[in-house]
Amino acid sequence: MLALCGILFGAPTANAADAQPVGTFNDWRAYVEGSGQTKLCYIVGEPRRKLPRAARRGDVFVTVSHRPGAGVRNEVSVRIGYPFSAESNPFARIGSDTFAFFTGVRANTNAKEWAWVDNEARQGALVNAMKRGNELVFKGTSERGTLTTDSYSLKGVTAAMKAIDKACSDG
């Protein structure tokens, strides 16, 4: 699993108190937190559609993060707004590309509403697919057995990524 498991609680939130906005790029927002070794740059997108509509859920969003002090780049995470089922095999689909995720439940953490790309080497491919695509569809199953499908517009991802690439560059 990703090195991320050791820092799950440092995951960005949609409304982090100490986050400084970098900008809004269509359907995505970019932020920077901290400095030096603790600097975190990330983009956040919220779903355009959440199914089933009647499902009771908390905050739902996708983030892509850079943590240069930890050597982390293009870390994709999803907050689903409910605790995942231990049997859930969540995935994201962009066009014909599918990306498997693992959950905080499977990683045995307290981050039971979070999921991350299962294969760290695929994160760059997912970010590139996000830049090329129009829509990201994320599916996962709650601990109550409800399959949810969230659809995210990818309009603005490329510009938002450029903004955090610049904000978290070494130069």
Image: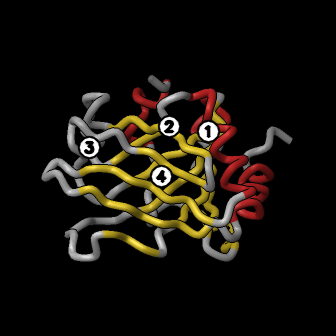
**Disc 3 from disc 4: Cα separation:** 15 Å
Question: What secondary structure is marked by label 2?
Answer: strand
In the rendered image, residue 133, in percent from the top left (x then y), is placed at 69, 59
Can you tell which quarter of the image residue 87 is in?
A: top left
Tell me: residue 101, above or below residue 141: above
State how the image is colored: secondary structure
Which residue in the protein does label 4 denote?
Answer: 12
Which residue in the protein does label 1 denote?
Answer: 67
Question: What secondary structure is marked by label 1?
Answer: strand
Q: In the rendered structure, which amino acid carries the disc numbered 3?
A: Lys
Question: Pointer 1: residues within 10 angstroms few (<14), some, or many (20+)?
Answer: some
Choose mark 1 or mark 3, whichever is in front.
3
Query: Quick check: 110 left or right of 42?
Result: left
Q: In the rendered structure, which amino acid carries the disc numbered 2?
A: Val
- Asked if marks 4 and 1 touch (Cβ < 8 Å), the reply is no
Looking at marks 3 and 2 on the same chain, the residue that comes earlier in the sequence is marked by 3
Which residue in the protein does label 3 denote?
Answer: 112
Q: Quadrant of the N terminus?
A: top left
Tell me: residue 156, above or below residue 8: below
Q: In the rendered structure, which amino acid carries the disc numbered 1?
A: Arg
Query: Quick check: 11 left or right of 167?
Result: left
